[in-house]
Image: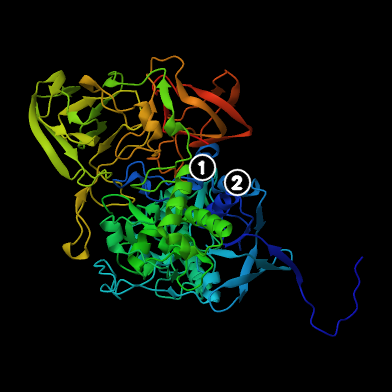
Amino acid sequence: MIKENGFPEKRKLKEIKVETDLIIVGGGMAGTCCAITAARAGLRVTLVQDRPVLGGNASSEIRLWILGATSHMGNNNRWAREGGVIDEILVENLYRNPEGNPLILDTILLEKVTLEPSIKLLLNTAVHDLEKKGDDEISCAHAFCSQNSTSYALYAPFFVDASGDGILGFLAGAAFRMGAEKADEFDEAFAPDHGYGELLGHSLYFYSKATDKPVRFIAPSYAHKALADLPRFRSFNMKDHGCRLWWVEYGGRMDTIHESETIKWELWKVIYAIWDHIKNSGEFPDMTNHTLEWVGTIPGKRESRRFEGDYMLHQKDLVEQREHADAVSFGGWALDLHPADGVYGDKPGCTQWHAKGVYQIPFRTMYSRNINNLFLGGRSISASHVAFGSSRVMATCAHNAQAVALAAKLCVEHNLYPKDISAPKWIKILQKDLLKTGHYIPKLNLEDSEELVQHATLKSSSTFQLQKFPADGPWKHLEFSMAQLVPFPAGQIPEMSVPIKASEPTTIHLQLLAASKPGNFTPDVVLEEQWIEINKGENQTSFSFDYELVDPGYLFLAFHANSLVEVKCTQQRVSGLLTVFQKFNKAVAVSSRQEPPESIGIDAFDFWLPERRPGGHNLAITFSKPLDIFPTQHLTNGVFRPSLLSNCWVADPSDSEPSLDIIWDKKQNISEIKLFFDTDSDHPMESTLMGHPESEIPFCVPYVKICAGTGDLLAEIKDNHQSVFTLTLKEAVETKQLKIYLQHPSAQVPASLFGVLCY
């Protein structure tokens, strides 16, 4: 029993002092991935989250899917899913949760964090004050947990603001912006005017479900009455729910920080009015048995403060895909701005324009220019309003924050400030450390003098030489133009043939296409074209191009749409090969060709999009000579996904026990081995709502055995589904040889590997 007499002075809350290497404020996807990355790098981390679960907009509290550069597979950014921890989380979520249940994602995020013993997780804990050391450094953050009535004094040499609204940076006096820059500041022709608005608003989502009997609904008194008159609601799709209702947006003309509760109430009024209209207007008789299952209680925020670093990302960085010496991350979502009036306006819910490929994000955007020990994470990095329209999405934010985590490690270990890391010496180290984790940085490959495999001889039991795909797949009607992406070697393009079926005699238009910028997958250059006459019925149609490729790279073998024609496909799938179609995804585009106004500084081009499985078959193509496009040398080129090349070694499908030998001239001491597998980085793996037809990626090798040259078993990996496997040996092994055995994922998919690292 506790009994305490009256107290003449003010009582003080219980206070706990916490000292770690890094304080991360905000437990959204950025803060979560930052914390895990930093902890795995050896830092002691405090992760402060003001909500009861992790994930921010991706959590069960808001239920927005995690997306980034892949953009629903609706742009030309092939193999662009973010790497590192965010990739690990998305792959794990697919494995455990292909249905897209946001509650399961909550458990995965909490598990990943709690498995790291050096992370101190503070849920339901809000930062509200701080202390500074001088004018330009934070010494302590003060936070309060309402659930245990405890205050925390959080000390660290370095802080990360991944809070979204930037509470830490604001309190610290970090330079920030809120609203939209004028077009002339960064020469951004897409900058919005006042009529469109300067801020993106908030959204709330809801779910309904069917029952076995009629369900009535009595609207709360605060629900709006005249909702059906709103322009946006007149096109309401009854199949939409959850974050497909992103357009139920409001608040872009308000203070999206201090008026957030007011905005939330307005969105509640709109949502309950929507449901009232659905249930009681008589216009939706199919919804009689439906009940309102869930409505969000906190809004999904898009925009508030953006902080200033030593560089501000802007429109031309994205559209022109400018390269930066301090690139540590990348983006690829559309430049996606929303009208400030939201659901009450008559403008479309968003204006999206895509770049021709992914763009680099420099490290100089990821720390405050005037608070020396403050890193910037999440959506509040240093970017203009226009660039923010792309960089704000969760997978991009998480990927940036992983770079912040490893930069913090360098700062702690070498007594540096964040801005010191932007020097060439430290940036090269940071880039190397990131790439070793599976993190992807466009145009960069891993160069590590300490890595051992690059000095070894590689011998494989077999290598797949692409010459012919079996014609055992479906016929594909050329309703849309279709292209096979092939990473051709340098030299003359070989003669090819494809089974083609025509319902009437016709002519087919064939093109060999390329991207104008190496590494892009926007086929905006016609290398050669021809028209071939096709007889009625089935034909084995041969064709050749008088074109010699100077450098190896991806080309598009394109068959233009023809309603009379079908092409034969194969069931065989191989890493680094896919087909694309000239069409559009209505979630992120309105036409198969992007045609922006000439005045806004954005390119016009065609979309060539892949199909999701079980579609997306390769063509049943035959080449006059085998293509050596999956050699073992790819395993040491330091790129762990298709880019300019396939970048993978693929075993021959007929090889019953594929294996790889790594042989050195003299014995090596090996304590760590990393393997990089194909989990199809072209797949967005939307984390919630959509659902996916598979829980494991068909290209991923499920079983691996690693042996020393003596035959001693070092590791056996069963039921593998992840992109990266790291074997850390308790005691270093001294050997001149490693042997790696792999299992084919299936009869239709040969085993492949993107890289092997040994230390």
Q: Can I make out residue 197 in this image? A: yes
Q: In terms of secondary structure, where does tag 1 sit?
A: helix
Pick the quarter of the image with the N terminus: bottom right
Q: In terms of secondary structure, where does tag 2 sit?
A: helix
Q: Residue 519: x and y, percent?
A: 28, 44
Residue name at image x 29 percent, y 63 percent: 315
Q: Which amino acid does label 1 sit on?
A: Glu
Say whether marks 2 and 1 touch (CB < 8 Å).
Answer: yes
In the depicted structure, whether residue 711 falls above or below residue 59? above
Residue name at image x 63 percent, y 70 percent: 141
Coloring scheme used = rainbow
Q: Residue 586: x and y, percent?
A: 31, 49
**Foreground of the two, 479 or 628:** 628
Q: Earlier in the sequence, mark 2 or mark 1?
A: 1
In the depicted structure, whether residue 584 falls above or below residue 172? above
Q: Which residue lies furthest to the bottom in this view?
A: 8
Label 2: how many Cα within 10 Å (few below 14, some 14–19, many 20+): some
Q: Can I make out residue 62 in this image? A: no
Q: Residue 110: x and y, percent?
A: 62, 49
Residue hosting label 1: 88
Marking on residue 69: none
Quarter location, residue 177? bottom left
Quarter location, residue 490? top left
Q: Which amino acid does label 2 sit on?
A: Lys
Residue hosting label 2: 112
**Foreground of the two, 273 or 101:** 101
Residue name at image x 61 percent, y 55 percent: 53
Q: Residue 441: x and y, percent?
A: 39, 48
Answer left or right for 595 relative to 39.
left
Label 1: how many Cα within 10 Å (few below 14, some 14–19, many 20+): many
